[in-house]
Amino acid sequence: MKTGLADARDEAAPIVQLADVAGAEAELAPLERARAFAEPLLAGRTLDTGEDAFAHAEGVAAILQGIGAAPSMRAAAYLVYAGDFLQKPEEVVAKAFGESYAGLVAHTRRLVQIQRAAREANVEAQRRAEQTERVRKMLLAFSRDLRVVLLRLASRLQTLRWYAASKRECPRALAEESMQVFAPLANRLGIWQIKWEIEDLSFRFLEPAPYRQVAGLLDERRVEREQGVEAFRVELGEFLARSGLKAEVQGRPKHLYSIWKKMRGKGLDFARVFDIRAMRVIVADVPACYAVLARVHERWTPVPGEFDDYIARPKPNGYQSLHTVVMDADGRPVEIQIRTRAMHEHAEHGVAAHWAYKEAGAKGYAGVSAGSDFDAQVAEARKAVLRQLLAWERDFVERGVEQGTEPGAPAGAGMFDDRIYVFTPQAAVVELPAGATPIDFAYTLHTDLGHRCRGAKVDGQMVPLNTPLKSGQTVEVNAIKEGGPSLDWLNAELGYLQSSRGKAKVRAWFNALAQRDTIARGREAVEKLLQREGRTSMKLDELAAQLGFRNADALFEVVGKDEFSLRNIESLLRPPEPAPSEDEAIVAKAVKAPGRVPQGGVLVVGVESLLTSLARCCRPAPPDAIGGYVTRGKGVAIHRADCINFRQIAARSPERVIPVAWGERKGESAAVYPVDVVVEANDRQGLLRDITEVFAKEKVNVTGVKTQSIKDAHGGTAWMTFTVEVGDASRLAQVLAQVARVPGVRAARRR
């Protein structure tokens, strides 16, 4: 039932008062406090199924009590449903009862919403199967707080009981989900008491005709059969007592769905189903179990092929018992189960019997540690539950139809193929991608722990760091005090990392390391320049700000990468001259140059024989578009028009920019110009030789080369800067195309 914000606020007022009174009533048990907390919220409310909300919470608490849950666990049932009618349930519950209960409310409500969406989705069968798989995955993920699993099982059983008692038609989607999800889960956890009742009630709603048939067969001559069962129980008890064996003998309840499944699966007649008449014998210890079995087989004739020793070979969910079938005096089969008291508790309540709710109390499992013997026991119980959930999932994948899926529907294969769940030594659950290694585990816990990881133990045994982990294992990381990752971890063939998080963290570490080296080189270059200029007292952050950078490190980084010329810093540091310079006077001349082309092959438009020089930052060459900049005492510097340095200085001093053009040399040999070429390639032997051979073949003179090699996961990257001489820059594209064809070269471009 939906509730408006106003209603939620109206209902929250008495709750806040209850929370205030809680301090004065500290002696109240958690169950009583939670019940008083929830009753005014739930009174008169109904759930989406039509159930009375408070009655449902009461029923869930009663079911939990029936399987031995402590009052603190039963209290959670009230808080979960009260949360549906609060505006901010997590905050209110956390204030009144603590963070552990608040987390339980949040997780359980989220799971209920997903289950509801799966049932209400009006989609085809395959889509519905995908929704059901999503519910199973949520159940597994929420095993981080084991109380959620038990609460959902008890809640579903209470809902089925309500439909049966009210004689209302149960929605088929809800009954199917109960049979396909909740009953197998309870079975895998060994909670027989909940498992058999969910199966019987789901069977009643899904297969009403077979249900009535089996129920009718059981009801025939019921009084006579019950009298016979009681007579055999008394006879068995007296016989064991005379034999000196102390035992408790019970009659076992009849499980309708189990009877029908045996009749259908094995093609048996109702009379051949041996567990219609059944006894349960509970003794003190294991030797007594086998002693009772021996005496029973002496007294009554066993049925061949109907003996199972689940004590020596327990079922996957931990169930242990001796099963045998004997013929009574009238020739009718009677099944007898023999077990110890501990086995009986586990058979009825499964892993819930040792979840330690009584001792955990309101703390739950939110802050469990292995610092004491008790905490270690709780941690082991937690691990046992998760292993059972994982084993149940594997069973479902392998035998989906047997678990109750419709013929032809997906059995769930691939449901958890992409994820695994492992433990920390403190029993915290960690979710990882399938195939993850101890290094992935370390990075999931903390980035710094991943960097310092140098070894790992899995279930107490040292393993290599590239060992794939499996669900249910306990992983412990051995780390050094300081250190970083290895480049080998990024080598996919070595298999050290599978998670995208781990790979990103390692790459980020090496990128930061390379950046630190680059900044250090840039700092050294800038500080040397300041020393030459006699400006060592200048603050570096102020210098960077004047040049347009956010801080000094940003300036050092571009300088260290050779992306920013130190000449820009020189121009900033040198003070402007008060009077017009000789060069500025030259700019003012308007005499046309009839004489020879100046040195460098560049003609300053409108000025004769002016000193020019080609800028080294961009190395212009014909037919590049060029521009001139009048320097102080060094003539005109020629830049490419697209040079970033030229654009910056032109923006600062536009009056010093002067038009220039390439001149023509008549009667002289063609001029050549130095040009920088950058080559990026996979590092290998002979690479430099092969590239220089291409330049020689193309008749391009190489006047200088600078190389740098950086090792990486692929073996290494080589960066090479060649200074070559060309008469025409347009021909350079053809030469670079030949260089790019050299094996291993990734890119070749003009700088």
Image (cartoon, rainbow, N blue to C red):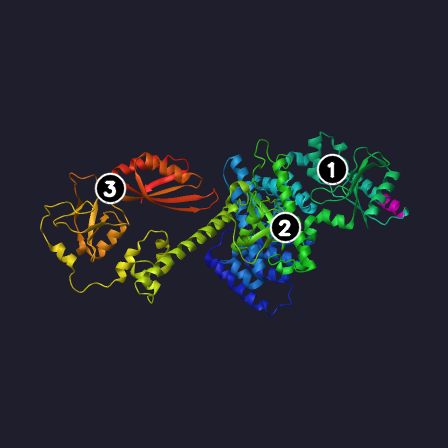
In the image, residue 22 above or below residue 116: below
Q: CA distance from mark 2 to mark 3?
A: 67 Å
Residue toward you, 671 or 37: 671
Residue matched to label 1: 218
**The C terminus lies in which quarter of the figure?**
top left
Please name the residue that numbered disc 3 is placed on. 672
Asked if the magenta segment contains residue 321, the reply would be no
Nearer to us: label 2 or label 3: 3
Can see residue 492? yes
The residue where tag 2 is placed is 457
Q: Amino acid at mark 3?
A: Val
Viewer-closest of 724 and 139: 724
Residue 289 percent location from the top left of the image: 82, 45
Query: In the image, 173: left or right of 559?
Result: right
- Above or below, comparing residue 124 to residue 378 in the picture: above
Of the image marks 1 and 3, the number of the one nearer the N terminus: 1
Q: Position of residue 698 (x, y in %)?
A: 31, 35
Mark 2: secondary structure: strand
Quadrant housing residue 99? bottom right
Say which element carries label 1: helix
Magenta span: 234-241
Residue ID at (50%, 48%) = 501
